Image: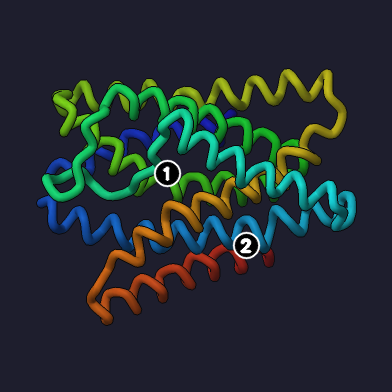
Amino acid sequence: MTAVSLVSLVSLIGVLTLSLKLEMLRKLTMFLVSFSAGVLLGGAFFHLIPEAVESGGFTPILSAIILAGIITFLFLERVIYWRHCHVPTSYEHPHPFALMNLVGDGFHNFIDGMIIAGAFLASIPLGITTTLAVILHEIPQEMGDFGVLIHGGFGRKKALLMNFAASVGAVLGAIVILLLNTKVAAISSFIVPFTAGGFIYIAGSDLIPEMKKETQSFKAILHIITLFLGLGVMLLLLKL
């Protein structure tokens, strides 16, 4: 519950962007996007999948659950119109559906809470690692969400409050998993590989494509280096 509460508080990161110019915010956000891509991929391949394999072996069922995670996140993005965007709003990058964004973000945070609770049920170190991955991913996303709400007509204070309200879904998601765990044995054996699939989808479908929009060679190289830094952080966590 402490972990998901921290994730919810990340929604208030928008207050730190109020004094930044749009161009500076865009540059900062893109490096955060690159870093979080590495963190999510590292979390999936260095922590979640090995944990799932250690528990039950690398079976076709495990592969199917990872694929289910990827397909589920695709479904959420396409059918429910959850746009997991990390670039602040502008005339070149508009986000006209502020209310839809709030609904989608609330559902997304609900899933984050389920993911974190399921990881803690598997093991405390895995829960801590997963929480870190989610938080580092949430920072650029919440910056983007704050921009969406401002562009949609919300005042700055109301945008912060509404964004925080949507983030409380993480707490609800964690409660659901903790309650289900008393009724469904080894629910973490499903949640862990499912989370890996979700992390892979978010990194591959949302974050890396944003990185590919950079046309300047030097900045593109810096973004790749930042991605490797994210991978390195998750690799170092294996030593803790």
Question: Which residue extends farthest front?
Answer: 79
Precedes in sequence: disc 1 or disc 2: 1
Percent position of residue 101, x then y: 34, 29
Above-or-below relation of 236 to 161: below
- Dot 1 alpha-carbon crowd within 10 angstroms: few under 14, some 14 to 19, many 20 or more: many
Residue found at x 63% / y 37%: 115
The amino acid marked with disc number 1 is: Glu
The amino acid marked with disc number 2 is: Leu
Classify mark 2: helix, strand or loop: helix
Q: How is the image coloured?
A: rainbow
Classify mark 1: helix, strand or loop: helix
Residue found at x 42% / y 56%: 207
Looking at the rendered image, the quarter that the C terminus falls into is: bottom right
Residue found at x 80% / y 49%: 62
Q: Is residue 78 or residue 175 the one in the foreground?
A: 78
Residue found at x 59% / y 28%: 1
Percent position of residue 232, x then y: 54, 70
Question: Residue tagged by mark 2?
Answer: 237
Q: CA distance from mark 1 to mark 2?
A: 19 Å
Question: Residue tagged by mark 1?
Answer: 138
